[in-house]
Image: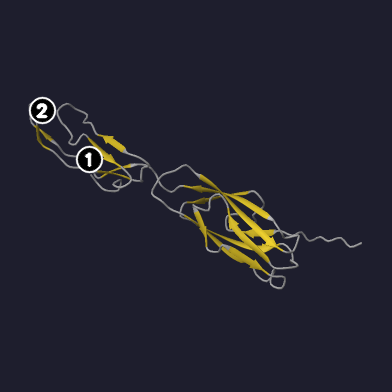
């Protein structure tokens, strides 16, 4: 009796980990490109097609929607797939996506193989207020009246999901700031006011 030591499966390598295993968890940053080299673990009896999907497919895209392996060329070279992660200007909590690779073939050992990996995307945006000047010069006369003032502007560092109001109050009763508050939203957050 000869026992077969080959196991039908998908072998994946990438720069983040040396080898993806089922249910591997990988971290990337927003706007990163993750390149994966994909092979089959043994020779198939018939053509094998790999399909890419998962719950994060609206947040990342691939340069290939399918990969094709044949019984003659299955081991010659790994096929590269690139995952492109989107970028926006909104600060968010880390998002976790599930990448599914589904194999389909008339070879019963490769039919319906499902490989899943979890990808955690770290956001590169930081919610912050940017002030145009670090110091201001204001002249006050001897009775506490303002003689002249100075100008500064504000803007947001990242796009808000809703309305943001910033109120500015002077430290003394002898000065005032006009306007006392400014509002930002997704359309004007990067415009200085």
Name the residue nearer the viewer: 176 or 67: 67
Which residue, given by chain and number where applicable, does mark 2 sit on?
144
Secondary structure beneath label 2: loop
* Whether residue 18 can be seen here: no
Say which element carries label 1. loop
**Residue 34 x, y percent position in the rendering:** 54, 58
Quadrant of residue 108 within the rendered picture: bottom right
Residue 12 lies, in percent from the top left, at 64, 59
Q: Is residue 142 left or right of residue 164?
A: left
The picture quadrant where one finds residue 178 is: top left
Tell me what residue is drawn at x 21 percent, y 34 percent.
180
172 or 50, nearer to the observer: 50
Quadrant location, the C terminus = top left
Q: Taking 138 as reference, is 114 above or below it?
A: below
Q: Tell me if residue 168 can be seen.
A: yes
Quarter of the rendering occupied by the N terminus: bottom right
Up-down: is 150 above or below 171?
below
| Furthest residue toward front | 106
Q: Which of marks 1 and 2 is nearer the N terminus?
A: 1
In the depicted structure, whether residue 140 falls above or below residue 31: above
Within 10 angstroms of label 2, few (less than 14), some, or many (20 or more) residues? few
- Color style of the picture: secondary structure
State left or right for residue 155 relative to residue 73: left
Badge count: 2
Question: Looking at the picture, does residue 108 appear above or below residue 89?
Answer: below
List x then y, in percent, for residue 136: 19, 40
Q: What residue is shown at x 10% (from left), y 27% (from top)? A: 144
- Return the residue at label 1: 135
Measured as percent of width and height from the top left, residue 106 is found at: 73, 64
């Amino acid at each position: 009796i000869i026992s077969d030591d080959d196991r039908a499966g998908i072998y994946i390598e990438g720069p983040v980990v040396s080898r993806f295993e089922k249910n591997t968890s990988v971290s990337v940053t927003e706007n990163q490109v993750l390149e994966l080299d994909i092979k089959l673990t043994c020779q198939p009896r018939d053509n094998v097609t790999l399909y890419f999907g998962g719950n994060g497919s609206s947040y990342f895209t691939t340069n290939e929607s399918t990969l094709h392996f044949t019984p003659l060329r299955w081991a010659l070279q790994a096929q590269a797939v690139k995952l492109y992660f989107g970028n926006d200007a909104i600060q968010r909590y880390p998002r976790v996506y599930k990448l599914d690779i589904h194999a389909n073939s008339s070879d019963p050992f490769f039919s319906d193989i499902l490989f899943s990996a979890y990808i955690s995307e770290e956001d590169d945006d930081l919610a912050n207020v940017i002030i145009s000047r670090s110091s201001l010069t204001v002249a006050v006369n001897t009775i506490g009246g303002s003689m002249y003032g100075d100008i500064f502007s504000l803007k947001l560092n990242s796009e808000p999901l809703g309305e943001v109001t910033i109120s500015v109050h002077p430290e003394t009763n002898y000065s005032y700031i006009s306007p006392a508050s400014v509002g930002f939203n997704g359309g004007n957050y990067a415009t200085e006011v």
